[in-house]
């Protein structure tokens, strides 16, 4: 883990604190970058078997999708949700189980129909 978000967990800034901390951590691993699949794999290696940490990242990911898919009038946008899911598809596949992905797709289909 000599590069990517996991590298940031091991680096210390001038203030003596980790370069990557707090709310910056989930954003570094769950993103729409071209490295998103590798970033999720790094997360898997950095936090093996830590279910609470994985649950926290999943919660962040779903909150991030909801926020990105919500218009300024607080209404979910089908187009925004589809785009978010598309641009984060590799991260979602690495983070969620097949069943969870199917459930997320079902929610997206419900939003599309509404």
Image: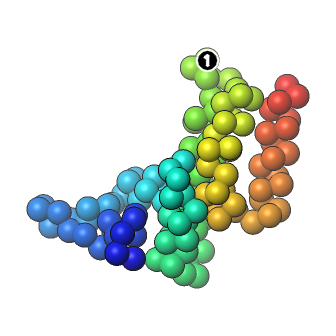
At a point 32% along the width and 61% down the height, the residue shown is 20
* 30, 4: nearer the viewer: 4
For residue 55, above or below residue 84: below
Query: Is residue 35 at all visible to an observer of this figure?
Result: yes
* Percent position of residue 31, x then y: 52, 51
* Percent position of residue 73, x then y: 61, 17
| The N terminus - image quarter | bottom left
Bin the neighbour count of mark 1 within 10 Å (Cα to Cα): few under 14, some 14-19, many 20 and up. Answer: few
Query: Is residue 52 at all visible to an observer of this figure?
Result: no
At a point 51% along the width and 58% down the height, the residue shown is 35
The coloring applied to the image is rainbow
* Percent position of residue 56, x then y: 55, 61
Q: Which residue is mark 1?
A: 73
Farthest-out residue, top:
73
* 51, 106: nearer the viewer: 106
- Quadrant in which residue 69 is drawn: top right
Farthest-out residue, front:
34
Farthest-out residue, right:
113
At a point 54% along the width and 81% down the height, the residue shown is 48
Tell me the element at label 1.
loop
For residue 86, above or below residue 89: above
* Percent position of residue 19, x then y: 26, 62
At a point 85% along the width and 38% down the height, the residue shown is 109
| The C terminus - image quarter | top right
Count how many numbered circles sit on residues in the image: 1
- Quadrant in which residue 66 is drawn: top right
| Residue 57 left/right relative to 104 | left
């Amino acid at each position: 883990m000599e590069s990517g978000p996991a590298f940031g967990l091991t680096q210390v800034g001038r203030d003596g604190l980790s370069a990557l901390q707090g709310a910056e951590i989930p954003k570094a691993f769950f993103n729409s970058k071209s490295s998103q699949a590798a970033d999720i794999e790094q997360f898997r290696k950095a936090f093996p078997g830590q279910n609470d940490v994985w649950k926290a990242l999943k919660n962040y990911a779903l909150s991030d999708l909801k926020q990105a898919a919500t218009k300024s009038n607080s209404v979910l946008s089908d187009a925004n949700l589809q785009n978010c899911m598309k641009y984060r598809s590799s991260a979602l596949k690495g983070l969620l189980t097949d069943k969870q992905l199917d459930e997320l797709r079902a929610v997206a289909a419900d939003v599309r129909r509404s």
